Image (cartoon, grey):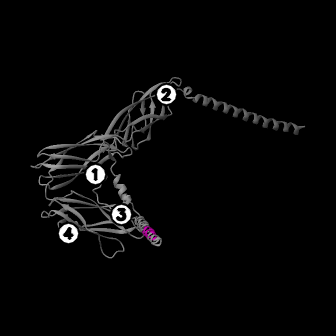
Amino acid sequence: MRTGCKKNGMAVFMGTALLLMIFLGASAFADSDTYVSGASIRVSMISQDPDPVKPGEYLELRWMVINYGSTPLEDVEFMLVPDYPLQLLGTDNGIRKIGTIQGHQKGEEGVVLYYKVRIDEDAAEGVNKLTLKYRYKGMDGWTKLDLFETRVQSVDAAVVIDDILMEPSRITPGSTGKLNIKLRNLADSLMKDVNVKLDLTLSTIPRSATGAESSLLYDALPFAPTTSASERRVQSIKPGGTAIVSYDLMVYPDATSRVYKLPIIITYKDELGTEFTKNDIIGVVVGSAPDIYVVIDQTDLVAGKKTGKVSFKFVNKGVTDVKFLDVSLKETEDYKIVSANKEYIGNIDSDDFESVDFSIYLNDNGDADHSAVISFPLHIEFKDANNVDYDKDVTLEYQIRTAAEKGEIKSQSALMIVLAIVIIVAVWLGYRWWDRRRKRKEAQKK
C-alpha cells in the first residue's frame, strides 16, 4: 500500500512539473513574439465609418499597419480587392503605395491605411468580407491577408442622438464636467432596453492582443467617469419621444488641450425584440483660456539718456499652449519707437516664456538728475491650443531712475579712481626713468 501511494505521489509531481514547463514555455513564446527577426507585418482594422453602412452609401475604411520585424520593408504596397458589394471610386485601382516601413515599430508608430469606397445599392444586409493584399521589395507577387469584415444594414436606426450639452463647454485638464446626451426615437413604435455606452477605452476597434497596442488604445481618451460607470440604460422611449442620459467626466491632469472624439455605442430593441446597434461619435473640447502675463524684463533707460531698449517678457503660466502670439507697442507723448513697433513671437508652451525688444527715443529725458515714470501700452493677439482667438491690451509702467539711483555713479567714480591711480603710476615711472637718465648724463660729464 505504501508503494502505491509513493507511485501516485510521484505521478502527480511529474504532471504538475510538466504543466508548469508548458506554461512557462508558452509565456516565453508570447514575449518573444512581440518583436521577431526578419520581416513581420501585422495589419489590424481600425474602423469602418459608418458602421453599419447602408446599401448605396460611401464607406471609409482604416487599417493600422505595423512592422514587428527587425528588418525595414521597402516599396510596401497594399491592394484592396473590389469584391461585391464593395466598389472602388473613379480611377482608384485599390493600390496604396506606403514606401518604407521601419522595423521594431510600436502601436503608435504604425501607418494608417485609408480607403473610401461605395457599397452597391443592391447589397444584401449582413456581414461582408473584405480582401486585402500586400507586397514589398523582394516578394514574389501579392500576399493575401485574412479576410476582414464590414457590416451592411438596410434598416434605419430609429434611436438617434438629438442634442449634446457639455457643462462647461470646455473642460480644463484636471477638472470635471457633465455630459448630457439627448436621445430621440424617430420610429413610429416603442423602443425599449436602450443602452448608451461611452467607449472611453476604444473597445470597439479590432486589435491584436499585444500589450503595447492595448495600453495605447486604453489611454487614448483622457476621460474617466467619476460618479458612475460608462453605461446608461433607459427602459423605453415612446414614438417621437426623447430621453436624456448624463455622465460626470473627469479629464486627466496631463491631457493635451484639443478636441477629442468620444465613441458612443447605442443598443436598443424594437417591440418584436429585434436588437439594433448604432455607433456614433461626439466631440468634447479640452482646454482653458490662456493665462498669460507681461513684465518688463530689462532696459537700459536712465535719466538724461534719450535712446534705449526695453525688453518685454511674455510668460504663459496656464495649462494651455499659446499660439501665433503677436505684440504691438503703441507710441505715446513720452517716446517714439525707432525700431519696428510690431513683433511676432509665435508659440509659447505652457510654463514657458518668450521675450521681445523695442528701441525707443525719449522726448523729454534731458535732466540726468530727475527720474520719471512712463507708460508702455501693449496690444497682444494670440490663439489657444484649439485656435480660439484672443486679444488684450496691457499697459506697463516703468520708472526711469537717475544714474545715482541705479548705482551707475558709484561705478563711474570707481572707474575714475582707478584711472587716476593708473595716471599717477605712469607719471611716477616716467619720472624715475627721466631721473635715472639725467643722473647718467651728469656722471659722464664729470
Instruction: Sort mark 3 into few (<14), some (14-19) or many (20+) by Cα contacts within 10 Å.
Output: many
Instruction: Sort mark 2 into few (<14), some (14-19) or many (20+) by Cα contacts within 10 Å.
Output: many
Which range of residues does the magenta coloring cover? 9-18
Viewer-side residue, 117 vs 13:
13
Return the residue at label 2: 400
Which residue does the image show at 34% across and 65% down from the upper left? Answer: 42
**Mark 1 or mark 3, whichever is nearer to me:** 1
Return the residue at label 1: 199
Q: Position of residue 265 (x, y in %)?
A: 23, 52
Q: Earlier in the sequence, mark 3 or mark 2?
A: 3
Q: Earlier in the sequence, mark 1 or mark 3?
A: 3
Q: Position of residue 236 (x, y in %)?
A: 16, 46
Residues at marks 4 and 3 touching, judged by CB atoms closer than 8 Å: no
Give the structural element (helix, strand or loop) at label 3.
strand
Q: Position of residue 182 (x, y in %)?
A: 19, 43
Q: CA distance from mark 2 to mark 1?
A: 61 Å
